[in-house]
């Protein structure tokens, strides 16, 4: 490999630090790591300091192209892609029972898993996802098939065999022993693959479907092997009441008492977290995967991500397929912006006759597109405790990147035929991509310097 790219580059350095290079360069070594980045004007000087670096390929991007870090999906259910778009007129618990559990049970069939997972990975890569935190199903073997498919196609991923031993249908539930043993075997099998791309993640479906005993066991397995953890928290009000009645604690404490809130834990949703729960997340260094599409579709509520971020919680974005209806993190960016604007309206509007809302805040500033790009890239990497290896273009990290081409349909600027098309500046191109673009504008996808979308 060993590539040098010259051209327009954007990335983020933190929630409020958005950096652009209108004439930039990125040098990538044979291992797929970034060894140089900056303005083209300092490239000659960089070369004199890196005499060992021999570029095999040098590419100059066109004026319609720019480099952006790969998208990170912090929460996606790979098996549910097979039912994407169905049952989204239902509340969470009905949707699970009517559609999701019967579908996930089908993954006992490994042939079905092979065919579906090949398509899932292909489609998330097409949408620009370089790193995904995938839920599999209760089946160890099928979830291993997902891991191997991710590896074959060259994506980066955290993958979990789902665990549940209660409050689930008879046809889709395991005993405590089965689900804990299956998890330990799954972890060993992934470790045998000897890859940096795929890591196992401990995956209790949610506190409702796991007994205290199982939660404790999963906490032990995670600590013993220093593993990532993923689950759901505080998605819908009826689910929260159910969890509280089972555990006699807050939802966050139900996980924390089992040692499942760690700096390597990402919890999806967190729509209705109480102040004490946010404090607990902060103490443990636990992150949130914000899933605006499914929160809207399943009528779960508004997640105020700015409240989480102000309290020091790391936040990334999740598509939450198929509670969400799109596999694209670019779509999740738009949904997150929508939710944030809607929250702003609620906080600022005076409802005639009802007095002021308790949540009213006339100073509330919604997310902007640059902050949403942070959530989709570096924010996601940090939420998955992988910010040291991916998420932006910093020397020492892997080159996980997208080449966006804004000359491709539908980003053409409409211009009367007698006038020359207007040249957009870099930030205008970024806005075009975010607000009206789609996966057709993502012309190439790289993970660890390897091109995985042709
Ligand atoms: Zn989910």
Image (cartoon, rainbow, N blue to C red):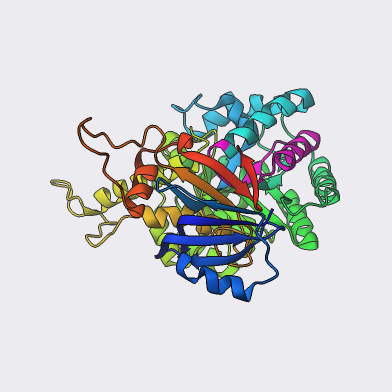
Which residue range is magenta in the image? Answer: 126-155
In the displayed structure, 80 sits above or below 13; it is above
With 100 as the anchor, is 30 left or right in this view?
Answer: right
Residue 453 visible, this angle: yes
Left or right: residue 125 versus residue 236 is right
148 magenta-colored: yes
Counting from the top left corner in percent of width and height, residue 216 is at 74, 55
Question: At 43% from the left edge and 34% from the top edge, which residue is drawn?
Answer: 297
Side of 53 where 19 appears, left or right? left
Q: Which residue shows up at 64% across the image and 61% down it?
A: 389
Residue at point 27%, 39% (across, down)? 421
| x and y, in percent, of residue 333 in the image | 42, 46
* Front in this rendered view, residue 399 or 6: 6
Q: Which one is nearer the viewer's eye here, 146 or 186?
A: 146
Q: Quadrant of residue 300?
A: top left
Q: Quadrant of ligand 1?
A: top right
- 120 magenta-colored: no
Q: Nearer the viewer, residue 104 or 142?
A: 142
């Amino acid at each position: 490999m060993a590539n040098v790219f010259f051209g327009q580059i954007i990335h983020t350095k933190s929630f409020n630090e958005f950096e652009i290079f209108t004439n930039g360069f990125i040098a990538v070594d044979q291992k797929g790591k970034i060894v140089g980045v900056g303005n083209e004007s300092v490239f000659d000087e960089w070369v004199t300091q890196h005499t060992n670096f021999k570029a095999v390929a040098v590419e100059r991007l066109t004026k319609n192209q720019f480099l952006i870090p790969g998208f990170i999906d912090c929460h996606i259910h790979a098996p549910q892609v097979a039912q994407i778009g169905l049952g989204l007129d239902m509340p969470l618990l009905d949707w699970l029972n009517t559609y999701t559990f019967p579908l996930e049970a089908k993954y006992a069939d490994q042939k079905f898993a092979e065919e579906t997972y090949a398509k899932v990975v292909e489609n998330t890569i097409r949408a620009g996802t370089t790193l995904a935190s995938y839920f599999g199903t209760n089946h160890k073997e099928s979830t291993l098939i997902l891991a191997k498919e991710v590896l074959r196609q060259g994506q980066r991923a955290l993958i979990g065999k789902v665990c549940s031993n209660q409050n689930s249908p008879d046809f889709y539930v395991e005993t405590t022993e089965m689900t804990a043993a299956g998890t330990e075997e799954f972890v060993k099998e992934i470790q045998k693959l000897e890859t940096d791309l795929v890591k196992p993640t401990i995956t209790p479906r949610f506190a409702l479907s796991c007994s205290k005993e199982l939660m404790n066991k999963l906490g032990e397995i995670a600590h013993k092997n220093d593993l990532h953890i993923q689950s759901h928290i505080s998605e819908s009000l009826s689910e929260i009441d159910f969890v509280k009645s089972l555990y006699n604690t807050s939802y966050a404490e139900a996980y924390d008492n089992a040692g499942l809130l760690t700096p390597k834990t990402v919890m999806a949703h967190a729509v209705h977290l109480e102040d004490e729960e946010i404090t607990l997340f902060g103490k443990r260094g636990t992150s949130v995967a914000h899933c605006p599409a499914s929160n809207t579709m399943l009528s779960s509520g508004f997640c105020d991500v700015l409240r989480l971020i102000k309290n020091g919680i790391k936040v990334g974005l999740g598509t939450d397929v198929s509670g969400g209806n799109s596999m694209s993190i670019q779509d999740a960016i738009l949904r997150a912006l929508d939710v944030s604007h809607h929250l702003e309206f609620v906080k600022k509007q005076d409802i005639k006759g009802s007095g002021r809302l308790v949540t009213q805040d006339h100073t509330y500033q919604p997310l902007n597109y640059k902050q949403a790009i942070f959530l989709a890239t570096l924010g996601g990497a940090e939420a998955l405790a992988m910010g040291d290896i991916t998420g932006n273009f910093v020397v020492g990290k892997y080159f996980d990147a997208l080449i966006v081409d804004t000359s491709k349909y539908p980003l053409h600027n409409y211009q009367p035929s007698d006038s020359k098309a207007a040249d957009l500046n870099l930030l205008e191109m970024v806005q075009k991509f975010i607000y009206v673009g789609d996966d057709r504008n993502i012309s190439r996808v790289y993970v660890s310097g390897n091109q995985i979308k042709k």
